[in-house]
Every structure is written in structure tokens, then in C-alpha cells.
Amino acid sequence: MPGAMSLVLIAIIALLVFGPKKLPEIGKAFGSSLREFKNATQGLVKDDDGVKKAEKTEEEQK
């Protein structure tokens, strides 16, 4: 499990660097940033799907 071990190591280093009081704030900010990124990418995928559907209907009408 090298992946899990590296995550534990990163968590320990973050705890040492930022301290126990700042760590929850950083986690919350990271989570909200990740959520915003996910929503933005989903919007791009939906927009792309809408363009493809419009192109198909135009081709079918010809």
C-alpha cells in the first residue's frame, strides 16, 4: 500500500507545517475549491453534449 503510506506522510507533514488549528480551515478551503472545479467541469461537459445534440439534429434535418 504505497499510496496510503504516502497520504499518511503528507498528512503528517501538513500537520507539522500548518499546525492543528489551521489544518481544518485548509481542508475546508480545499474541499470547496474541489467542489467548484467539479461543478465547472460538469458544466463544460453538459455544454459540449448540447452542441453535439444540436449538430446531430441539424444533420438529420438535411
Image (cartoon, rainbow, N blue to C red):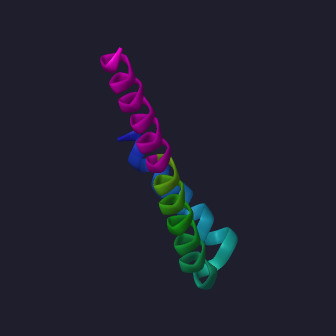
Q: Say which quadrant the N terminus sits in.
A: top left
- Residue at far top of view: 62
What residue is at 57 percent from the left and 63 percent from the top? 33
x then y, percent, for residue 19: 64, 78
The quadrant holding residue 29 is bottom right
Number of numbered tags placed on the structure image: 0
**Observer-nearest of 61 and 56:** 61
- Residue at far front of view: 62
What residue is at 55 percent from the left and 56 percent from the top? 10
- Residue at far right of view: 17
The quadrant holding residue 14 is bottom right
x then y, percent, for residue 30: 56, 65
Q: Which residues are magenta?
A: 42-62
Q: Is residue 54 magenta?
A: yes
What residue is at 67 percent from the left and 73 percent from the top? 18
10 relative to 60, above or below: below
What residue is at 37 percent from the left and 17 percent from the top? 59
Q: Is residue 35 magenta?
A: no
Left or right of 62 on screen, residue 9: right
x then y, percent, for residue 26: 60, 72
**Observer-nearest of 55 and 44:** 55
